[in-house]
Image: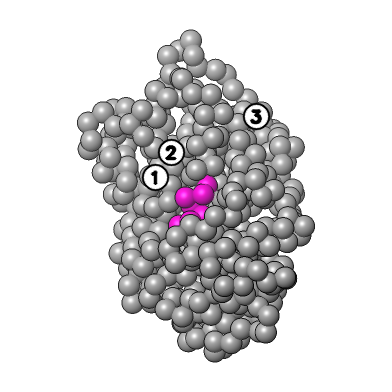
Amino acid sequence: MRYPSLLNRSCAARALTAGIAALLSAGLNGAAEAPTVPTVTALLCGHLIDTAAGKVLGETTIVIEGGRVKEVRSGLQAPAGAAAIDLKTQTCMPGLIDSHTHLTGQTSRTEYVDRYHWNLADYVIRSTVYARRTLLAGFTTVRNLGDTANESAALRDAINAGVVAGPRIFTAGKAIGSTGGHADPTNGLRQDLMKDLGPVDGIINSPEDAIKAVREHYKLGDDVIKIMPSGGVLDEGASGDNSQMTLEEIRAVVTTAHDYGFAVAAHAHGAEAIRRAVLGGVDSIEHGTFMDAEDMKLMVEHGTYYVPTIIAGDFVARQAKVPGYYPATIAGKAIAIGPLIQATAGRAYKAHVKIAFGTDAAVYPHGENAHEFELMVGAGMPPMYVIQAATVNAAALLRHDKDLGSVAAGKLADVVAVPGNPIDDISLMKRVSFVMKEGIVYKLNSVPVDTGL
Ligand SMILES: [Zn+2]
């Protein structure tokens, strides 16, 4: 895989110490003057969700050392010398994974005008705030599916280096699509501002272009590939669901991407575009609005994941009714497409399509990601399944299930907690009270911890 090392040991050790020091200064165990800082942390959880087994366990102690889980024991018993964190009234679970974000932008009424005034740096500075909000909402890992000029890789690297607080990012850089399609940033502009873009800009018009575009992403150090086989809602093209890539172009992307160890995520609303993407071998279908029974059958056969992003459809459909929020072309597409995703997600679940949690964050304000859990349950999915979609399933889609997706000895110490049992009340997922990423505590008792970031 082209993925960066998941755990930078010296950085993690430094940050772990900082995290524990922050806990001590918060007066947790009154040992601020102790000569040695504990290197082992014990989370005393009232309950733990075993996402691999799909069960809610009783009182459980999670022992953490060096950014990884050392041991998971039943009962509440911290090892001697460990810094204990009391989560007895909480339900613990693995750090949540959002499989579809865009951390370097965010919706606003002025979004389509700002792009003529803002430099890339304006977006990047704001992205550090969005990243922190996402982490504090309990999302310790995201798959970032599209930016402008690979700026999300800089955000990823700054987070990994401990410069800013945020989730672990696996980024696609800029999405790949065709001329005039959903990935063409000059769509809908005045003719003299339109540009004839090529593979280096992520715009392809042949299998040869597709190969070059993927290799360009490898050169830039990206982690995953995002393609646009269908039209989309938030660009100024006429159609939100037409087919915009040939099967041969999709196959060329996928074959090359898999050569380099990249998974491929396909934005697709139309049934034909979904069919081509699945036959072309992509790893996930994003949105999937007009997915039909044949598409679902093919996805089950091919093991293709579905990332519904119901919250994005719901948000754009509501905002489209606010006069002037979107340009007219976009508002029309948002009203036609947005409200349909929830029902599609429900049908896909019933058809046994594998589902990974993802939200298209940026289309709605960052940090509100967990509302997707409620919408998934509203589509007919059981609460345990939607939590698995955001943990074990999303980790498998990322090809990082060895390190992520469940709380178990040897895995990265990403743990979040909510006050109560989310299986009984899924809305608790919006009230994450505790966040630990790689052994560092970022939120405790519902309050952000000052880690110095
Ligand atoms: Zn998206």
Answer yes or no: is residue 418 visible: yes
x and y percent of residue 445 in the render? 44, 67
Magenta region includes residue 371: no
Magenta region includes residue 133: yes
Q: Mark 1 points at which residue?
A: 365
**Disc 3, SS:** helix
Which segment did they paint magenta?
131-137
**Which image quarter: residue 351?**
bottom left
Query: Which one is closest to the eye, mark 2 or mark 3?
Result: 2
What amino acid type is highlighted by mark number 3? Pro
Answer yes or no: is residue 274 visible: no
Q: Of marks 2 and 1, which one's residue comes earlier in the chain? A: 2
Q: Name the residue under label 3.
A: 199
Few, some or many residues within 10 Å of mark 1 (<14, 14–19, 20+): some
- As rendered, which of 412 and 59 lies closer to the eye? 59
- As rendered, which of 127 and 21 lies closer to the eye? 21
| Marks 2 and 3, how far apart at CA | 26 Å
Badges 1 and 3: C-beta atoms under 8 Å apart? Answer: no
x and y percent of residue 242 in the render? 42, 37
Q: Does the residue labelled 3 lie within 8 Å of ligand 1?
A: no
| Marks 1 and 3, how far apart at CA | 31 Å
- As rendered, which of 420 and 175 lies closer to the eye? 420
| Marks 2 and 1, how far apart at CA | 6 Å
